[in-house]
Amino acid sequence: MIPAICVVGRKNSGKTMLIERLLPELLARGRKVATVKHDAHDFEIDQPGKDTWRHRQAGSTTTVISSSSKMALVRLTDSDSPLDDLLRMVDRSYDLVLVEGLRRSACPKILVHRPETGEPPDVLGDIWAVVGDKMPDIDGNPPCIPLEDIGMLADLIEERLLGGPVQTPAWNLPALLAEAGRHHGHLCPGQVLGVRMAILGCERLGIYEPKSSKRLITFVETDRCGTDAVQTVTGCTLGKRTLKFVDYGKLAATFIDTETGRAVRIAAKESARDAALRFLPNEPNAHEAQLHAYKALPDEDLFSVQDVRVELAEAELPGRPRGRTVCAECGEGVNNGRELSVAGRTLCRACAGGPYYDEVEATVGVQEYQDGTP
Ligand SMILES: [Zn+2]
Ligand SMILES: [Zn+2]
């Protein structure tokens, strides 16, 4: 069974708000977290008149509804489901389930307490921590943690429920730099920045083995040195459709965890170059100064980091080509919906908008071309 902890407390004591703060903290620590919410009232997920509601009216006691982005199961019950049954519905890849409510389950509890909302409710199971500014009169002696100290609460959960913090494999910077140098052809400052940028991006997403995780999609914003290094660390490539190139001419990249939808954009700071020269003031060669300083300077001196959201269209995702058609003009095949419709004809982008190349002679077949006898 997946470890679970229940957030309990009086109505309006701030249980949901605590989960809203705790969840991102645990995700940032590389944990995969699911949630369960117990509703004391009878929630209604099916709106009258909708198809699933009509299925139920017709007698269905279990209805599954699914789309390309989510699915839900609605099963009629005649009593509260035991927590164990609810936990069994969460797949085993999760590390932890945060439960809102279910104070009478056997799971450990976090009690959210605000004196204004009254004395704490009766709770079964151990209270591991009280979140709030004032300790209520309860048995045991759990620590009282202010809502602002969410890191302390996450530490406690990791310690007691998950066997301590995630053992993050140290990134082997020298080995990655050597690999990047081989791939790119030389080790340049751009390789060092690219390798460190990719490490930082992966770390922010809690992805420590990007090449085998299959979770990562990376957008790169330049076709210069650093992009090769990003590929080396992440294993993302154009051919696997996990590397996307947008030509902004910036040493920046956005790393997307396709499993959680979280994305982080990392850009090299314009001031990084000066920071490198200041770091090695006696190095007369700026290129050498950058090459070495970029290995040692802290991330804050080199990069700006922003959490972002990236909408990925279905047709952009890895996997088999979605759809294939043939250009009505040139007869060449076009994958992934890249064709355009012009005046009712399906055309490739070259035929529709003018190609990036100019034809020199009439196109010849490969055999004739090799024979030299067109
Ligand atoms: Zn280079
Ligand atoms: Zn065409």
Image: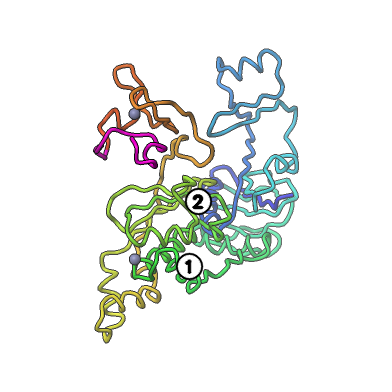
Q: Residue drawn 54% across and 49% down? A: 215
Q: In this view, does 126 lie above or below 14?
A: below
Task: Give the side of residue 47 with respect to residue 269, left or right.
Answer: right
Is 362 included in the stretch rendered in magenta?
Answer: yes
Q: Mark 2 points at which residue?
A: 216
Task: Give the side of residue 210 with respect to residue 129, left or right.
Answer: left
Residue 184 position in % (x across, y down):
40, 64
Q: Tell me how far mark 1 sits from mark 2, CA to CA.
A: 20 Å
Camera-side residue: 306 or 352?
A: 352
Q: State which tag comes first along the sequence, 1 or 2.
A: 1
Q: Residue drawn 55% across and 14% down? A: 49
Of marks 1 and 2, the one in the foreground: 1
Image quadrant of residue 153?
A: bottom right
Mark 2 belongs to which amino acid? Leu
Image quadrant of residue 51?
A: top right
Camera-side residue: 155 or 339?
A: 339
Is 168 included in the stretch rendered in magenta?
Answer: no
From this viewpoint, which residue is outermost toward the bottom? Answer: 282
Check whether the beta carbons of the residues at disc 1 and disc 2 lie within 8 A of each other: no
Does the closest atom of ligand 1 sit within 8 Å of the Cβ of label 2? no
Q: In this view, does 275 lie above or below 234?
A: below
For disc 1, the neighbor class at 10 Å (few under 14, some 14 to 19, many from 20) is some
For disc 2, the neighbor class at 10 Å (few under 14, some 14 to 19, many from 20) is many
Looking at the rendered structure, the secondary structure element under dot 1 is helix
Task: Give the side of residue 318 with respect to residue 167, left or right.
Answer: left
Q: Which mark is residue 179?
A: 1
Q: Residue drawn 52% across and 59% down? A: 150
Mark 1 belongs to which amino acid? Glu
Magenta residues, as a range?
Answer: 356-374
Q: In this view, does 354 lie above or below 289?
A: above
